[in-house]
């Protein structure tokens, strides 16, 4: 037989004898269970690309039991050297080869990003900061980028109301523009189901967003939202001032019970002092608030005041509104009296 052929056969046989068992182990589910074990799934957040060796050290700190010699052998065999930044969900199911490939290729797992309704900019940025590799400053820079906002049909005044509250599946390393763009896109999608026949750059869209944001801070029960929406539109259509308490809270920069002097506070968002809607939204409204603004209840109510039951009392005339307001004031005074009485009787 040709000596070259003999050498080739010898090489192939040696390769199969040496490599195949190792390759089998590398792909063996039983093998990874014996060399990598954890009571729970591990969420691994890698902020900066780093060597796989240091990632294994991090896993050990998280309570993962592993054989470092086996992992080093497997790493050299696989050829993977570093792990890109990202979020990786690791389990002890699958093969060691799959684990190394996931880390080496940077095959991230998405995270759940939750944006709550009725928030201010700072609160939303804190939510994004806590659930992203980027911080508040990075997201704030996007919210002030007028040129980019124009590309997604927004601006610095309107964008707060377009940060649609929802739970999203995103990647931890997604760029701030990707995340903010996704929120704005979902807001547009929600509004498109409520406002038909008008482009989303129209004044109508902007008015609905602003009105929905006010309703978001005004309501206490979902069933009242559309009634509140109808009342506010009735006021505007009757050339009355909106006189919405939430806009005063926004102007003051805090949500609290308002005092009489607060209503005279001069501010472009104080609807006790200005005509029409404020210049922009005061919070990020939910879908039901957008619906209440776009499709309000039809009625003749012009006034409302809180009631002892925790709801609102709605009135069509100022006279009836004054009666309902007196009931509310008397009830509040009675609560104060009861509170004082309890404090005085407490040793």
Image (cartoon, grey):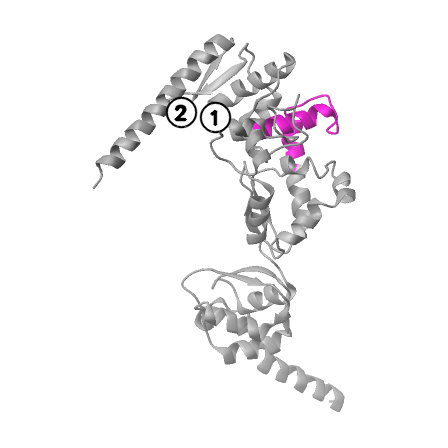
Reply yes or no: does residue 182 show up in magenta: no
Query: x, y (%) of residue 132?
Result: 59, 54
Quadrant in which the N terminus is drawn: bottom right
Main secondary structure found in the magenta portion: helix
Residue 228 versus residue 51: which sits nearer the camera?
228
* Rendered view: 110 above or below 59: above
- Which residues make up the magenta segment? 186-214
| Residue shown at the point (67%, 28%) measured from the top left | 192
Residue under circle 1?
Answer: 222
Q: Are marks 1 and 2 in contact (CB under 8 Å)?
A: no
Res. 31 in view: no
Q: Earlier in the sequence, mark 1 or mark 2?
A: 1
Q: CA distance from mark 1 to mark 2?
A: 12 Å
Assign the C terminus to one quadrant of the image. top left
| Residue 168 location (% of width, % of height) | 58, 44
- Residue 232's place in the image compared with 81, above or below, is above
Q: Secondary structure at mark 1?
A: helix
**Front residue (pair 98, 87):** 87
* Label 2 element class: loop
Q: Is residue 317 above or below residue 159?
A: above
The answer to whether residue 276 is left or right of residue 336 is right
Q: Residue reaching furthest bottom?
A: 3
Specify the label residue 310 is tagged with: 2
Number of the label disc, if any, that sits on residue 244: none
Q: Would you call the spot at circle 2 few (<14 residues within 10 Å), some (14-19), or many (20 or more)?
A: few
In the visual, does 319 lie left or right of 107? left
- Residue mark closest to the camera, 1 vs 2: 2
């Amino acid at each position: 037989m040709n000596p070259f052929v003999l050498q080739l056969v010898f090489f192939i046989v040696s390769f199969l004898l040496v490599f195949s068992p190792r390759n089998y182990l590398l792909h063996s589910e039983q093998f990874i269970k014996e060399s990598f074990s954890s009571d729970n799934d591990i969420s691994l957040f890698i902020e900066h690309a780093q060597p796989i060796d240091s990632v294994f050290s991090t896993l050990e700190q998280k309570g993962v039991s592993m054989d470092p010699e086996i992992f080093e052998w497997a790493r050299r065999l696989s050829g993977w050297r570093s792990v890109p930044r990202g979020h990786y969900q690791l389990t002890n199911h699958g093969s060691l080869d799959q684990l190394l490939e996931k880390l080496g290729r940077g095959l991230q797992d998405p995270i759940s990003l939750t944006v709550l309704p009725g928030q201010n900019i700072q609160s939303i940025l804190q939510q994004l900061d806590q659930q992203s590799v980027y911080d508040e400053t990075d997201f704030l820079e996007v919210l002030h980028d007028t040129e980019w906002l124009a590309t997604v049909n927004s601006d610095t005044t309107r964008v707060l109301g377009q940060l649609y509250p929802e739970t999203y599946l995103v990647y931890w390393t997604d760029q701030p523009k990707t995340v903010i763009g996704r929120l704005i896109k979902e807001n547009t999608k929600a509004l498109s189901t409520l406002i038909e026949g008008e482009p989303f750059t129209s004044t109508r869209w902007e008015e609905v967003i602003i009105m929905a944001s006010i309703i978001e801070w005004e309501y206490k029960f979902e069933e009242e939202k559309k009634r509140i929406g109808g009342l506010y539109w009735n006021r505007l259509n009757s050339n009355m001032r909106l006189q919405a308490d939430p806009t005063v809270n926004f102007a003051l920069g805090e949500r609290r019970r308002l005092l009489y002097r607060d209503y005279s506070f001069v501010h472009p968002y104080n609807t006790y002092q200005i005509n029409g809607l404020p210049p922009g939204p005061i919070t990020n409204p939910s879908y039901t608030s957008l619906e209440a603004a776009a499709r309000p209840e039809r009625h003749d109510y012009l006034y409302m005041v809180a009631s002892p039951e925790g709801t609102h009392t709605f009135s069509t005339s100022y006279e009836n509104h004054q009666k309902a307001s007196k009931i509310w004031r008397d009830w509040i005074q009675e609560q104060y009296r009861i509170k004082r009485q309890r404090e005085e009787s407490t040793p």
